[in-house]
Image (cartoon, helix red, strand yellow):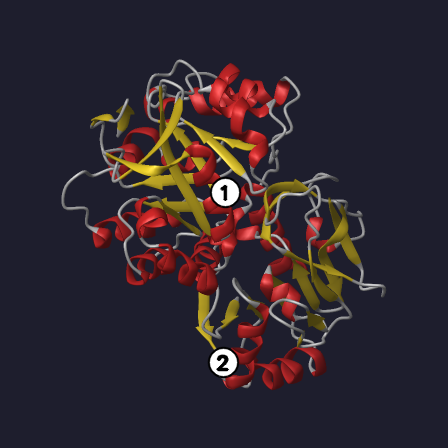
Amino acid sequence: MQSRNFRLQKVGNLNWLEKNYKFQNIAFSLDELVVLNATRNNKSIIDFAKTIGNLVNDAFIPIAAGGGIRSMGDAELLFNSGADKIVLNTVLYENPKLVELLIKRYGSQSIVASIDYKKNDENFDVYINDGSVKIDLGLEQYLHYLEKLEVGEIYLNSIEKDGTGFGYDFDTIEKFESKIKIPLIIAGGAGNESHFMDGLKYKNVSAVATANLFNFIGDGLPKARKKLIESGENLANWNVDN
Amino acid sequence: MKIVIADYGMGNIKSIVSALNYLGVDDIVVSADYETLKSADKIILPGVGSFRKAMIQIKENNLDKYLEDIVVKNGKPLIGICLGMQLLGTSSTEDGFTNGLGFVNGHCIKFDNTDLKVPHVGFNQLKTDSKFKLYDGLPAEADFYFTHSYKMVSEHQINQSYCAYGSDFIASFEYHNIVGVQFHPELSQKNGLRLLKNFIEKF
């Protein structure tokens, strides 16, 4: 999937990626993989878990999986299929009790809180249910709410920038990056390595995420990683021959 | 090569099995059975989650006694990964004070997060020494993937390497036949695969 302001274009499933891009090679240019099930209707957590199970066989990096997790059983299935972390969104707001139970069982470090937000005039509004329902808390309040819940990481996605390839929403990132003390992953809008570099300049941005480069631009990702390392970014290096 | 992953109902075992498969290990068993553990060439003690809960389940399965006999008394190589490494130490303050297996002299405490993000998540460099067999063939400051809120410290010499996050904590140790890594080699790309290969071949 590539999303363009949440209007999803289907570009293929993971099997398609595997066939066309030799996933293992791409995986070697990533630190972590976030796999989101963006199916709008009839999300099947069982099918999704099978996909995750297949991925784990070839990728020796942490995998965070999410999209449609509504119960302890859903989370358990994904963890048992090889997910190292789960990505929560709607339940964070609708069912904090479940989030607390998940954290108690799997630990904070296993829970990634995904936030979809949009700027409306002066407000930073947060949306759940695949970006379709606005909640009562603004972005700053919501960040504090999530930190209190003791989630392990924040995956902050700009609905407006998502899928554009025009760069992250740096205005918002600048405004909010220092407000939380848990790792922050920024998402939505990366189109080239200079966007990564701009994102990594922020002290409190722990990671930069991209879907665009990964899905559409052949060896864009390995090349971007190489450029980042060459330009002195402090990325993990694994040039070891096995 | 037979590797037995000690099973006490916790831990992301699937990614460890995948990494071992990738390295060509042909016999991988997940078990808490004494005879099975005894028949292993190497043992892996995995772990994700709470120290206290893990120790309760280890004791319920008699794994503390089995591992004491097989690993400490009889010298079978064992690697503890993440929480699995912490459990090899003497104690942890996670969820109250809990005694560990006590195979090495290390104590686990929470990161104090005055300036740090906790949990400590992501790839980080190690301070290693060429004498460590685990890091054979790896660059001096290799990166590995960490995700943890508690760190092991020790005043004793347990042949350890360090990682700096705030202050130095124990990233790994090689104490005779007992090895511990705070990071996840199975999630640390080529570096991690090489480290696992070193454990398999050199211990």
Quarter holding residue A20: top left
> Mark 1 falls within which chain?
A
**Residue B36 got which mark?**
2
A213, B74: nearer the viewer: A213
Task: Find disc 1 in the rendering and name its residue.
Answer: A144
Asked if B33 appears above or below B105 in the picture, the reply is below
Asked if A195 appears above or below A117 in the picture, the reply is above
A78, B65: nearer the viewer: A78
For image coordinates 56% across by 38% down, the residue present is A180
Q: CA separation, marks 1 and 2?
A: 49 Å
Query: What amino acid type should be assigned to the residue bearing mark 2?
Result: Thr
Position of residue B185 in the picture relative to residue B92 (left or right): left
Residue that protrudes farthest toward the left in the picture: A42
Tag count: 2
SS label for mark 1: helix
Quadrant showing the C terminus of chain B: bottom right
Q: Position of residue A234 (x, y in %)?
A: 65, 28
Asked if B54 appears above or below A25 in the picture, the reply is below
SS label for mark 2: helix
For image coordinates 43% across by 20% down, the residue present is A190
Query: What amino acid type should be assigned to the residue bearing mark 1?
Result: His
For image coordinates 62% across by 43% down, the residue present is B117
For image coordinates 68% across by 48% down, the residue present is B113
Observer able to see residue A62: no
Q: Position of residue A96 (x, y in %)?
A: 37, 55
**Residue A198 got which mark?**
none
Bin the neighbour count of mark 1 within 10 Å (Cα to Cα): few under 14, some 14-19, many 20 and up.
some
Contact, CB < 8 Å: mark 1 with mark 2?
Answer: no
